[in-house]
Amino acid sequence: MAVQPLPQPIQYAVEPDLSADAFIDVLHRSGLAERRPVADVPRVEAMLRNAGLIVTARLDGALVGVARSVTDFVYCCYLSDLAVDRALQGRGIGKELMRRTRDAMGDGTMCLLLSAPKAVTFYEQAGMKRHEQAFLFTDLP
């Protein structure tokens, strides 16, 4: 089935002041809410306030995608949240959000992310390289 063209182009922007309500809404519409603390609004507000970079995608003013990253802009960038409204997935919005995130970084900055289990094939199809030396250290003995 062919993807129907959008009535107007997606508008991308850096939005450091994105509201928690808008962010939570797109997390729900993307399916990522099941893996984020969306019921804890003060925590989500802190997540947004402490992010180094927030890139958004809007269609006719409505938020349809977001890439939220923690970064120092010179050495590393961790893209923590990549969410696109399910109704618009498959149109390149996620890839463009990642490209714009990478482009906002300084030369030589390492960009990385951890994939939700359901999104692994998306990242593989986007041509991303798996990194086999990644570790979680949240539950140290």
Image (spheres, rainbow, N blue to C red):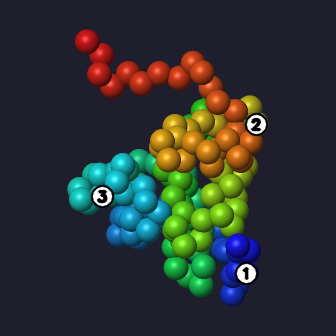
* Dot 3 amino acid type: Val
Q: Earlier in the sequence, mark 3 or mark 2?
A: 3
Amino acid, disc 2: Asp
Mark 3 = which residue? 38
At numbered mark 1, what does the secondary structure look like: helix, strand or loop?
loop
User: Circle 2 sits in a helix, a strand or a loop, which is it?
Assistant: loop
**Residue at mark 2:** 107
Q: Residue furthest front?
A: 1
Q: Is residue 136 left or right of residue 56?
A: left
Q: Are marks 2 and 1 in contact (CB under 8 Å)?
A: no
Q: Nearer the viewer, mark 3 or mark 2?
A: 3
Q: Quadrant of the N terminus?
A: bottom right
In this view, 90 is above or below 99: below
Q: Which mark is residue 129?
A: none
Of residues 127 and 57, which is closer to you in this image?
127
Farthest bottom residue in view:
7
Q: How many marks?
A: 3
Residue in the foreground of this view, choosing between 138 and 88: 88
Q: Nearer the N terminus, badge 2 or badge 1? A: 1
From the viewer's perspective, is the residue at label 1 or at label 3 nearer?
1
Residue at label 1? Answer: 5
- How far apart marks 1 and 3 lie (CA) works out to 31 Å
Q: Kindly give the residue lying farthest to the top in the view shown.
A: 141
Q: Residue at x 29, y 22 (%)?
A: 139
User: What whole-number distance in Å separates the C-alpha atoms at marks 3 and 2?
Assistant: 34 Å
Give the residue at x 58% y 59%. 55
Q: Is residue 108 above or below residue 1?
A: above
Q: Quadrant of residue 133?
A: top right
